Image (tube, helix red, strand yellow):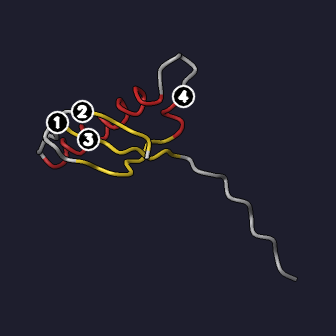
Amino acid sequence: MARKKPKGTGATFMAFNVNYEDGQLTSNRRVANDLLDQSYGDSIIDLARTAIEDQDNEIAQRSGQRRAKIKSIAVA
C-alpha cells in the first residue's frame, strides 16, 4: 500500500536582494524567519539588514575580506 507524502512545512526563510555602496548586487540572500520576528516593532527590512550584516561579518572573518556597506535591501 502506498504511503502519503508528508506535507511541507513551508518556507523557513525569506529572500532579499541587497545593493552595496560599491555597486555590487547580491540576489536571494536568505534570512531565517525566526530572525525576522516583528514583536518588538522593528520593520522586516531593519531586521533583515541586521541579519545580513551579521552574515557578512562572519564571511569576512573567514575570508579576510570585508564587504562594502549595505546601501539598500528589498524583498526578493
The crowd level at tag 4 (other Cα within 10 Å; few <14, some 14-19, many 20+) is: few
* Mark 2–mark 1 CB contact (< 8 Å): yes
x and y, in percent, of residue 49 in the image = 35, 31
* Mark 3–mark 2 CB contact (< 8 Å): yes
- Looking at this view, name the residue that lies furthest to the right: 1
x and y, in percent, of residue 37 in the image = 54, 28
Q: Which residue is mark 4?
A: 37
* Mark 1–mark 4 CB contact (< 8 Å): no
Q: Which residue is mark 2?
A: 71
Q: Residue at x 13, y 40 (%)?
A: 22
x and y, in percent, of residue 43 in the image = 47, 24
Q: Which amino acid does the dot numbered 4 rest on?
A: Asp
Real-space CA distance between mark 3 and mark 2, rounded to the nearest whole angstrom: 5 Å
Mark whose residue sits in front, 3 or 4? 3
Q: Which residue is mark 3?
A: 19
* Mark 3–mark 4 CB contact (< 8 Å): no
Mark number, residue 62: none
Is 37 situated above or below 14? above
x and y, in percent, of residue 74 in the image = 39, 39
The image quadrant of residue 72 is top left
